[in-house]
Image (spheres, rainbow, N blue to C red):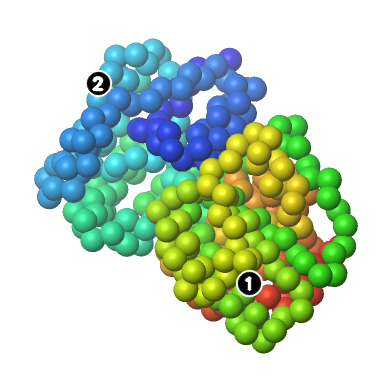
């Protein structure tokens, strides 16, 4: 059995979605190989400073990993900072183990726009663009969730996010309601979720005295949460939108069981993403919930249970949601 290492440059413990993806991937690797996960130690304070300086590198302790790996057939590295020290890390692996296959995962591509969206990341993207040119000398394949055949001149392996459906308990509330439709959105509240599109659509719908009541349950926390909360107040939607904060286990299941449909990301256009593979879409479908989304995902192909809106900043049409709901149920 082949021996490999799954190397993670960092673990953001606040983002449960990232850890889920890693756990699912390692479970799958273990069916076929002997794999060990390694987290590269990191000085977060120094990294946040040095990575944003013109000639600084993220403060990852690559040497600790190099000291621990033993004669690997392959290493699978999840994307971190592409800088001078990372290139040196790859060079060391190839020098120590010339036959080792190096696989590099880029969770979201293209990603320049994501980094550039914050001004203080100016030098991060400049260094990334410079040093990514050297990846072709060390990396054998890039795992991507996009449709690209090559990235940075390196042949890709096209992958999809997936889940273990045995771990997901489906909802059991299938019933047609004529007076109310309940939507649920479970997320870490990042700009690409774009829920403001839904709120603006609801606002215009209620201005027209819409008959069917649309309720939205927003589950989770994150950067965009206070923005969403403020917008809901400004649009006078407090009666229809409920923010629950982070929920897990039985509490989350009970919220899912109140929902008729689930809302996936509506703001991928902000970062020039059109085709992506998200864990949340898989979870929603495993729950048995129809999905509202504004991007392309492989789980939507040929799937009548997804209502896809344009991937732009336009308001979400509540009338289309109501029509879709009636057709599905």
Location of residue 177 by image quarter? bottom right
List x then y, in percent, for residue 229.
47, 62
Q: Secondary structure at mark 2?
A: helix
37 relative position to 81: left or right: right
Is residue 260 visible to us here?
yes
- How many neighbours does mark 1 have within 10 angstroms: few (below 14), some (14-19), or many (20 or more)? some
Along the line of sight, which residue is nearer the eye, 246 or 29?
246
User: Which residue is pictured at 68% across the width and 75% down the height?
Assistant: 318
Say whether disc 1 or disc 2 marks the residue closer to the N-terminus.
Answer: 2
- How many neighbours does mark 2 have within 10 angstroms: few (below 14), some (14-19), or many (20 or more)? few
143 relative position to 85: left or right: right
User: Which residue is pictured at 49% across the width and 69% down the height?
Assistant: 233
Q: Which mark is residue 309?
A: 1
Q: Quadrant of the N terminus?
A: top right
User: Which residue is pictured at 64% across the width and 22% down the height?
Assistant: 31
Identify the residue under disc 2: 63
Q: Is residue 200 above or below residue 302?
A: below
206 relative position to 112: left or right: right
Q: Secondary structure at mark 1?
A: loop
List x then y, in percent, for residue 30.
60, 21
Is residue 293 visible to us here?
no
Which is in the foreground here, disc 1 or disc 2?
A: 1
List x then y, in percent, for residue 88.
23, 32
User: Which residue is pictured at 35% across the width and 33% down the height?
Assistant: 9
């Amino acid at each position: 059995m082949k021996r490999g290492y799954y190397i993670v440059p960092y673990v953001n413990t606040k983002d449960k979605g990232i850890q889920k993806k890693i756990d699912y991937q390692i479970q799958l690797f273990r069916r076929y190989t002997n794999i060990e996960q390694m987290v590269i130690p990191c000085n977060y304070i120094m990294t946040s400073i040095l990575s944003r300086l013109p000639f600084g590198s993220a403060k990852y302790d690559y040497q600790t990993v190099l000291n621990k790996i033993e004669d690997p057939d392959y290493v699978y590295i999840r994307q971190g900072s592409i800088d001078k020290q990372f290139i040196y890390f790859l060079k060391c692996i190839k020098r120590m183990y010339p036959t080792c296959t190096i696989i590099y995962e880029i969770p979201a591509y293209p990603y320049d726009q994501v980094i550039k969206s914050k001004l203080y990341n100016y030098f991060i993207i400049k260094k990334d663009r410079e040093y990514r040119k050297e990846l072709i000398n060390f990396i054998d394949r890039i795992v991507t969730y996009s449709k690209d055949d090559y990235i940075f001149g390196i042949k890709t392996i096209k992958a999809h996010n997936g889940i273990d459906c045995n771990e997901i308990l489906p909802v059991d509330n299938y019933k047609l309601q004529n007076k109310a439709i309940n939507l649920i959105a479970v997320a870490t509240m990042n700009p690409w979720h774009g829920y403001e599109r839904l709120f603006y659509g609801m606002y215009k719908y209620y201005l027209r005295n819409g008959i069917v009541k649309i309720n939205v349950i927003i589950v989770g926390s994150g950067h965009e949460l206070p923005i969403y909360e403020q917008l809901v107040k400004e649009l006078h939607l407090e009666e229809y939108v409920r923010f629950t904060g982070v929920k897990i286990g039985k509490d989350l299941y009970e919220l899912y069981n109140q929902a008729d449909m689930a809302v996936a990301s509506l703001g991928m256009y902000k970062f020039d993403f059109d085709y992506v593979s998200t864990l949340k879409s898989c979870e929603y479908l495993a729950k048995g919930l129809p999905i509202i989304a504004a991007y392309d995902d492989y789980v939507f192909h040929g799937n009548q249970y997804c209502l896809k809106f344009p991937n732009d900043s336009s308001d979400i049409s509540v009338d289309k949601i109501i029509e879709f709901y009636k057709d599905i149920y």
